[in-house]
């Protein structure tokens, strides 16, 4: 069983560092999450391999 991982990303709108929880059992995922600081939505792209986060990216939804 894979445990959820905590990672820090930078919000593309306000540039604050925020924590996100990632399920590493899903190899490729993209979802929208509201920033906990500025409440603006951002699209988070995650690639995982063998239970580890290989790529993590956050971009503004307007792009
Ligand atoms: Zn923000």
Image (cartoon, rainbow, N blue to C red):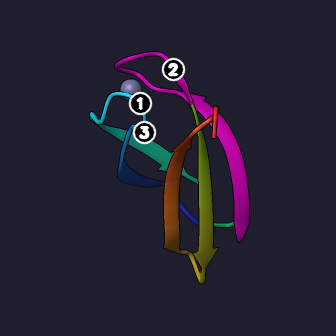
Residue 50 to residue 33: above or below: below
| In the image, the residue with mark 2 has its CB under 8 Å from the nearest atom of ligand 1 | yes
Q: Which mark is residue 33?
A: none
Q: Which residues are magenta?
A: 27-41
Residue 34 to residue 22: above or below: above
Marks 1,2: beta carbons within 8 A: yes
34 left or right of 26? left
- Measured as percent of width and height from the top left, residue 42 is found at 56, 35
Q: Magenta segment: does it hold 39? A: yes
Q: Which mark is residue 13?
A: 1
For this orientation, the residue located farthest to the left is 16
Q: Residue at position x 59%, y 47% from top? A: 44
44 left or right of 8? right
For this orientation, the residue located farthest to the front is 63
Q: Quadrant of ligand 1?
A: top left
Separation (CA) of disc 1 from disc 2 = 7 Å
Q: Secondary structure at mark 1?
A: loop
Classify residue 50 by image quadrant.
bottom right
Seen from the viewer's position, the closer of residues 6 and 31 is 31
The residue singled out by tag 3 in the image is 12
Note whether residue 34 is visible: yes
Q: Which mark is residue 40?
A: 2
- Measured as percent of width and height from the top left, residue 51 is found at 56, 75
Seen from the viewer's position, the closer of residues 3 and 31 is 31
**Label 1: few (<14), some or many (≥20) within 10 Å?**
some
Seen from the viewer's position, the closer of residues 23 and 41 is 41
């Amino acid at each position: 069983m894979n445990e959820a991982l905590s990672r820090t990303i930078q919000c593309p709108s306000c540039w604050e560092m925020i924590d996100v929880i990632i399920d590493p059992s899903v190899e490729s995922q993209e979802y929208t999450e509201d920033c906990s600081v500025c409440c603006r939505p951002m699209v988070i792209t995650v690639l995982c391999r063998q239970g580890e986060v290989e790529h993590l990216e956050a971009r503004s939804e307007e792009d």
